Amino acid sequence: MSLLSVFWEMVVESAPWLLLGFLLAGIIKQLIPSSWVQKQLATPGLLSIVKGAIIGAPLPLCSCGVIPTALAVRKAGASKGATSSFLVATPETGVDSISFSYAVLGPVFAIARPVAALLSAVVAGILVNGFDRETEPVPEVATKSACCSGKTCAAPPPQESLSQRLLGAIRYGFDNMIADTAKWLVIGLVGASLVTAVVPQSFFLEWGNGVAAMLVMVLVGLPMYICATASTPLAASLLFAGVSPGAALVFMLTGPATNIATMGVIRAQLGNRSLAAYLVGVIGSAIACGLALNGLFNYYGWDLQLAMVQQGMDMALWRQLAAVILLLLIARVWLRPLWRSRFQGGRAVTGDA
């Protein structure tokens, strides 16, 4: 099977689920304001750590988008543990990656992935609070403006109508979200196509199916800057090449949560001890979840359901149309700046003339 045909089949299989995931991400963004997130995580203790994981898991933020949100949460008074929990859960999973996982990896991974992400987030948060008991910052409380003592205060912004919020959800899901993830999604799809078309199925078997293979996945995923959605096709290709389900899960957990940018922010904002506890929590819990998943596969005799490598994949017209729409939306991310610069440059030349 040629590389191009593998890539196209992968896009056709994943496009409907990705588009649905991006739409759900936009709706969640409209329903859950950042101020509410900050308020929920401002109370120290175990409850805020659990809240950080639960709130962060469905949020439509990738590895880069979660950083400013986490900093705002921290400045609002969240503990280091709650901030770390939020930083782990948010990029490791999300509504878009869950739907994509169901389409490409099957229902077992669609359930195991968010459960493992929540567990690793809580463990990391608890370890950060336990290893680093430094004084927490005082929440930044907004002070009243001088005008608020009189009758000249500005009126609160008007509430958006349902249609405006729906348009905002569509705009965020199919514009902002795709702009944030386009490059890494393409890298993930191309990388998965290369592994599927070129690497023999027995290549990764020499690493075994135990902890050794998972440590290799940690080393592969640790420095990578990849979002949860983009890691999904790569994980599927690794499974097809012979990696165990648990090792693939380790890759999907460590890749999005331990990239260099995130680790740099944790070190700068929370300190070295928090960074060490963060890495121990993420890597340790990922390996534990990977071993548990391997045990479940062996005990129940589950079969892998890799849609990207199944013969006779559904190539219905509506799926191909969804694939074309997805590719056009991705191409728009790179073509729009070129179009704008050319258009604005043309107007500037016309004006000078």
Image (spheres, helix red, strand yellow):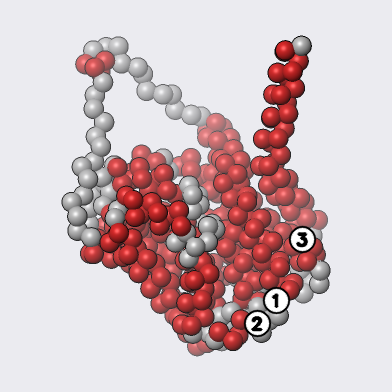
**Spatial separation of the CA atoms under disc 3 and disc 1:** 18 Å
Which secondary structure lies at badge 3?
helix
| Mark 3 vs 1: CB contact within 8 A | no
- What percent of the width, then of the height, locates residue 338? 70, 35
**Spatial separation of the CA atoms under disc 3 and disc 2:** 24 Å
- What percent of the width, then of the height, locates residue 149? 21, 16
Front residue (pair 97, 191) = 191
Q: Label 3 amino acid?
A: Trp
Q: Which-is-in-front pick, marks 3 and 2?
A: 2
**Badge 1 is on which residue?**
199
| Mark 3 vs 2: CB contact within 8 A | no
Residue 127: assigned label: none
**Badge 2 is on which residue?**
203
* Residue ID at (40%, 57%): 263
- Quarter of the image containing the C terminus? top right
* Residue ID at (43%, 64%): 117
